[in-house]
Amino acid sequence: MSFESADREPVILLGRRTAFARRHGALRTVTQDNLLAPVLAAVVAAVLSDTGLPAVRVDDVIIGNAVGGGGNVARLALLTAGLPVTVPGQTIDRQCGSGLEAIVLACRLVQAGAGSLYLAGGVDSTSTAPLRAHRLSSTADAPDFYDRVRFAPDDLGDPDMGVAADTVAAVYGITRARQDAFALRSHQLAVAARAAGAFEEEIVAVQTPAGPFAVDSGPRPGLEESLLARFQAAFTPAGSVTAGNSCADADGAVVVVVTSRAQADAWGASGYLSFVDAVPAGVDPTLLGVGGAAAGQALFARTGLSAGDVDRVEFTEAFAAQVLASLDLMGLPADLANQQGGALALGHPYGASGAMLVLRLLQQARTGSSPGELCLSALSIAGGLGLAALWRWETPKR
């Protein structure tokens, strides 16, 4: 997609995040606003350092959130971070696609000429998420607590995520061996990236009662194929999806800076991810794990591009089965995806995971891409949804 003016071409300039912690782990006492606030503050400081622009120039803060207690965590966190009261904020929910959706929305606003500087991303604290209960008709009755909201009506089917992953594995022939191998690869790549210092610049320390937390807790250096093979089916008696080839719920926050190419060039940026296009899609809720593939296929069709044009892929690893099935359906090789590991190793803070895809593409492209390389971020979402976005690594045209 092209535009007449560079001031309407959206680009991702930089990003920061917390380290990700497994649920009830190192970040178990930190609420989502206090996860997000230091990341927002760090991003604003980076923008000021790189461009000289004060926080008051931010047009909006757009944050995805899936399991919070409602309200507007974007506004609460930006005020907690010390941004001016004149900076607005909005919180959106497309479940685990929320973080990517927030970034896409910011890009669309730049395209529309509504603004030129947005902070966008996502946050979730699965550890401190509020209890949920239905209000009963009689005040004398105990509240009816439930674990998750409904995503689809009963006549279509509304399976739990793990059950749906087993269904996808069976329907698309994704073997247990492939799933375990992909999970092991995720841990190995994340461990290697962490050891090489690939995450250090982007991570913002979060203060906890035990001290600052700044290292992802999920990647397991000693994980072996033989250990993964010993895991039992986790969701259905004869299933192939296990705790070993599924992600762990996590706590974390991710924020990126969305601006225009004209602004980025004026600020002297050395490179950025240029937004190409994004498409959401819907699929059968019982096969929700392939929603990301449907979105990716629709995106290719709309842009006239194909899987063969893609140089890098980031796909949320909720379950190895759904990632592999989706990559197969899009015609993308598995070794192209998640080259610094994914949610199988790092964990899945739902509202932040989609934003993590974009941050990973940005950081990898900055250190190892040539101008023009095409990057895909995609994920499958509860209820039978998918979201995919295409990006191109660009350097200024001086």
Image: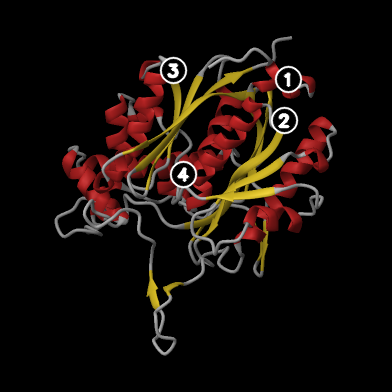
Task: Check disc 3 and report its element: helix, strand or loop.
Answer: helix
| Upstream in sequence: badge 3 or badge 2 | 2
Disc 4/disc 3 C-alpha distance (Å): 21 Å
Disc 3/disc 1 C-alpha distance (Å): 23 Å
Visual colour scheme: secondary structure
Q: Nearer the viewer, mark 4 or mark 2?
A: 2
Classed neighbour count for the residue bearing mark 3: other residues with Cα under 10 Å, few (<14), some (14–19), many (≥20):
few
Instruction: Name which residue lies at 55% across and 34% down.
Output: 104
Mark 3 residue type? Thr
Q: Label for residue 262? A: 1
Mark 2 residue type? Ser
Q: Which residue is mark 3?
A: 303
Disc 3/disc 2 C-alpha distance (Å): 24 Å
Classed neighbour count for the residue bearing mark 1: other residues with Cα under 10 Å, few (<14), some (14–19), many (≥20):
some
The answer, for residue 80, to whether it is visible in the render is yes
| Upstream in sequence: badge 4 or badge 2 | 4
Q: Nearer the viewer, residue 380 or 243?
A: 380
Whether the residues at callouts 3 and 1 have beta carbons within 8 Å, the answer is no
